[in-house]
Amino acid sequence: MIYRVAAALLLLMSLLPAAGCDKATPVAPNGTILTISANPSKIGPTGRSTITVVGRKPDGQPLNPGTEVRLSVDKGTIDPAIVAVDSHGEGTAIFRADGRSGTAKVTAMVGGGMTMVSTDVEIGQVAKTIVLQPTPTSVTTDGGTISLLAIVRDETGQPLANQGVNFTTDVGRLNSRGAILQTNANGQVRDTLTVSAQDLEGNVSTINVTAQTTSGEGALVSANAQIRVQGGRPVASFNYDKGSTDNEVFFTNTSTGGVGTLTFTWDFGDGESESGPNPSHTYSSPGPYTVRLTVVDQQGQSDVATARIIVPVTTPGSGT
């Protein structure tokens, strides 16, 4: 009998360490601080958004890894509904819209609801296209003011209101100074670009402007436009490459600037010449040739670009 009792005690003692190896799920302490965010915060009727929650103890340290945060939504679905935070106190889940428009409230809580926070995800039509229209489309070398109109439309082609648009330029200054502007009920938003004569020093021939907005999945939708600078002298340049036969060469004009329509005169270096922006020329024999392109604008201002080429051409090149 004594041996049986001793054996039972030994068995019980052997089980105690094993039971102690099971670790309980960490519990968020009272006073836990939760934050929650959605990216993107605006999605299409069947879009999705990444929900990020961050939990910190009252002393500012991250919640213990494995602490569970419960998520719920009043519209759409969330997966998973319970996230375990990592060593930084952070956890993520995916919210999916179910076709209903409006605003979905995503709520996170710990400690049986002692700490609770929420964020909104706007569900509706999202940007599909954006058009950028500058007025005027050219300025003189003295500079000027250009009105920029952006129009945003959704997947059905309808104007999209309250959509953020960002304008940028490589020359001059924008009234918005790079801030996000909102479209009106007609899907339109305007900015103003001011360019001075000093901005155009160095023979600037074009000004590049861009308007950008975001689609439902956080991707950028962009529109670009060029504003021509008139009054500066033309700058001649061209590219060349091998043609369809050994002695044929293709030439492509890349000249910029000037006033009005440019005219082009090519001297191929073998006694032959031609006009037009993008000619091809077949040489009678292989060898080195000096090609010259003369560009003249409507005010008689001109520039010349040259290149020393070897026929047959084996590597594309350029003339400046």
Image (cartoon, rainbow, N blue to C red):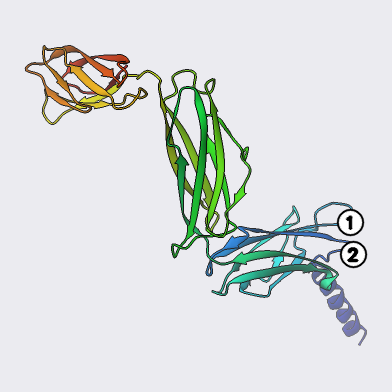
Instruction: Tell which residue pokes out farthest to the right in this image.
Output: 2
Q: Label 2: which residue? A: 30
Q: Label 1: which residue? A: 58
Query: Where 305 sits versus 29, above or below?
Result: above
Q: Where is residue 117 in the image (x, y as percent from the top left)?
A: 78, 65
Please give the name of the residue rendered at 46% of the width and 46% of the height, measured from the top-left corner.
132
Q: In which quarter of the image is the C terminus?
A: top left
Query: Where 319 sits versus 113, above or below?
Result: above
Q: In which quarter of the image is the N terminus?
A: bottom right
Please give the name of the residue rendered at 86% of the width and 70% of the height, measured from the top-left corner.
114
Q: Where is residue 210 in the image (x, y as percent from the top left)?
A: 49, 41
Q: Which numbered marker is on residue 83?
A: none
Q: Do the residues labelled 2 and 1 touch (CB within 8 Å)?
A: yes
Q: Kindly state the secondary structure of the residue where label 2 is placed.
A: loop
Mark 2: amino acid: Asn
Query: Where 26 sits versus 307, above or below?
Result: below
Which mark is first along the chain, 1 or 2? 2
In this rendering, does residue 170 appear at all?
A: no
Q: Position of residue 212 (x, y in %)?
A: 52, 47
Q: Kindly state the secondary structure of the residue where label 1 is placed.
A: loop
Instruction: Tell which residue pokes out farthest to the bottom in this image.
Output: 1
